[in-house]
Structures are given as C-alpha cells and as structure tokens.
Amino acid sequence: MKIGLEIHVQLPTRSKMFCSCPTTGADRPNQHICPGCMGMPGTRPALNKAAVEIGIRLAKLLNCTVPDVIWFSRKIYFYPDLCNHYQITQYETPIGAKGVYYLGKKPIRITRAHLEEDPGSMKKSGDTALIDYNRSGMPLVEIVTEPDIATPAEAREFLTALLKDIRHVVDLPDDGERSIRVDCNISMGSERCEVKNVSGLKNVERALTFEAVRQTKVLKAGGRITRETRHYDEERRVTTGARKKEYESDYAYIGEPNLGIFYVKNIADTIVAKESPQNMAARLDREFGIGERIAKQIVNTSVRLAELFEHIAKKTDSQCAVKWVTGPISSGWKAVEADIDSKKDAIIETVVLFRDGKINDIECSKRLKALISGDDPDSIEKQSADLDVIIRKAIAENPSVIGDYRKNDKAANRIIGAVMRETGSTYSSSDIVEATKRILDEMIT
Ligand SMILES: [Zn+2]
C-alpha cells in the first residue's frame, strides 16, 4: 500500500493572499469580498508579504529548499468558486521543494510546498448550488508528500504530528483539526486514486481505510483500478467516484503577468527556523536520555512545560526533573501555564531543595502543589493526609493486594480504581496513583 498526501493549510494572515479583504470575522456569506477577489475587470492582485514569510517558515520546518526567486502562475480551469476562472498558484517555483519530515525516525519525503489562493465554498441546496466567496482568495500552503506513508493509521499519525508542528511554528490558532483539508492518494496496485478534499484527521484515516478495502476487492476479483478522483461521504463513510483524474497537463498553466517576480532570498535569510515540538521531543530524549515516550508526553502536554523541564533538568538531573514534571507539575499544568513566568523560579528552587535532600518527597510534592494552585500549603497537607487515610482503608479491605503488588505492581490498579470511585473528582488521578504506589511501596519493604 502506498499513500501520498496533499495537505492544504490556511495561513494565519490578517488579509487575503492578493487583496486587502480580512480573513476572519465574517458573519454572513459574501461579506468579505472586493472587486479584486471577485475578478472584476481592471483589478490587479498584490502579493501579501506575510503569506510569503509564513510559507518560508513552513518550508524550513519541512527541511525544503527555498528558491531565491519566486513567481506565480495561473492554473486555468472552470472554477465556479473562483471568479477569475483561474487559480493563482505556484507551479515552477514552489516556496519549498525536496524536503523531508521525520515521523519519529521514519523519513516522509516532501515533494513540494507551494503558496496559492483558496477558492470559495459551495453549498448544495436541492438542485441549486450556493457559493460563498468569503474564502475565495484566502492564503494557503499546499504541502505535497511522496507516497512514503504505509497505512491509513500512519497517515493520521503523520498529520497529527505535522499539524502540531505547524501550529507552533507559524502560530496557527488551534481551531480544531478541521482547519486542514487533505487530498489523499492511495494505491494498492499500480494505479492510484485520489480522494479529494477530506477535512479532519479522523476522516482521512476512514477514507483511506475504505479505499484500501475497495481497491483490494476490485483487484482480487480480477478488476482494474482506474485513475480517478473520488469524493468522501462523511455521513455514509464511503468514497464515491466523482470524475476521471485530471493530469497536470489538463490545466493550462501560464505565468501570472500582473504579479511579477519576487526576490525572496533576503526574507528567507532573516527567518530562523523555530524548533518544532517533534524535533524538541527528539532533542530532549537525546540530551537527557529520558526515552522517546516520556519526551513526547511532556512536549505534547505543552512546549512551555517542556521548556520548564529543561530548566529543572539542567539545575538538578534528568531523573529528578522527570519525576516532578510528569507528576504534580503536569497534573496542575492547566492552572499554572498562563502565569508560569512568575512561578517558574520558585518551582525550580523547590525541586533543587529536594535534590539536595533538604526536603523529602512529601514536602516537595506539597510545596509544588501549593505553588501551582496558589492554595495554602496546610490545606493541601490536610487533603493529602485525608487521601492517605482513604487509601489505607481501601488496602485494609483488600489485604491480598499487598502480596499481589509484590509480584506485579499492576495490582495497585485495584486500589486506585476503588479510591477513584469513592472520591469522585475530589483528587486528580495522578495524585491517587502517586499516593497509592507510595503507600504500597512502604508496605512491602
Ligand atoms: Zn478581496
């Protein structure tokens, strides 16, 4: 099975790609349009420099080569949702070419990443199609991969990691996974089909899985796969044949004469690639030897948490940093992230005291929780003492758990489950897990 993806990401600029219409805040169809994005005679496109900068940042994230000079082309076709009947896109000089993105250790080759304008959106209503041009002219980057993806699940994993990285690197707002649209190419034999315009990562996996099964059935029955563009029906969860696949030669590309040629080397030189979350996880594992799973867990919670981890690990050691960052600091992270700058030093200091043996486990945990929640340390102490009592009682009711725990520490789950049921949402699950294991460890030694 071979899978290649074409990913369309809308760029977070304030105005459209070639005119000054705003990109957000429309409360009715066809509100944010102007003679330019409606293709009126006598108008000329003007390139949005911010879109070029973001394009270069993405190209660098994907380890692509950025050309010194770029220009745009008209992709001519019949587009009911683009008034010009051509789409302004990049053909010969994509903003990024020949890159590679590492999914863990697996390289996924990037063919190209190019800038283009989005068409409007169409809505069917009975026999009529309604067109909203608010989206027409929005800046997009289209990222095209080589067919290096092996399974539908890997496609989803790749998109999840890539989207996280893109959000961080270009400050794309997190408005759900539907903000990207994907064309999925998949072949089980020699010919491929393309499922167009799938939105949402879950749908990408479903559409690809459906296609893999369909194509396998056709081939097993002695049939042939014809190259075609298919459509994914989200409700019925099937793909249906839409039209014969167009080849690039079906489109007449000509240079866009109204825009000219742009020298972008000086912009590209000033843009320093920001470290992506996936690269950061790999680096934390490499530098601190904490393992891929823990590194990803920390970075995926938040890049700022990972930065805090780095500070703590440098001041103490990596084991100590993992213990406290994945424990009380992670579980209270949501509450503290916004004002972490004012609390960071006190948190680091507390862990240093623990490393130096000046405070014990329980004291360190109590102080960290108080710092994070802003609650009084005494009330936290009382709460944790109450939790200890509940856990000891649960163990007394199931005495066999102590012997079982000695053989296999998974036996603790019985107590953890019982305590969670009893206390509801009073304690965080990580507090219950931590206290139960601490008490059982004391009992078996
Ligand atoms: Zn406009």
Image: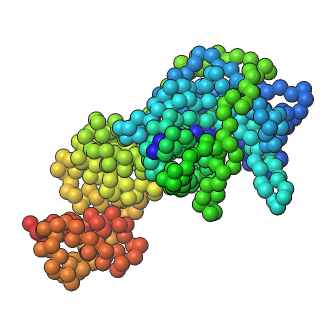
Frontmost residue, 220 versus 366? 220
Q: Quadrant of residue 114?
A: top right
Q: Residue at coordinates 23% horizontally, 70% vertically from top-left?
A: 412
The answer to whether residue 165 is left or right of residue 178 is left
Q: Residue at coordinates 79% horizontally, 39% vertically from top-left?
A: 79
Residue 87, placed above or below residue 321: above
Frontmost residue, 426 versus 116? 116
Where does residue 95 sit, x and y in percent of width and height? 60, 25
Q: Residue at coordinates 31% horizontally, 74% vertically from top-left?
A: 417
Where does residue 29 sit, x and y in percent of width and height? 81, 51
> Is there any visible trace of residue 317 in the rendered image?
yes
Work out which quarter of the rendered image holds the C terminus and state it. Answer: bottom left
Work out which quarter of the rendered image holds the N terminus and state it. Answer: top left
Q: Quadrant of residue 288?
A: top left
Q: Residue at coordinates 64% horizontally, 49% vertically from top-left?
A: 230
> Is there any visible trace of residue 50 in the rendered image?
no
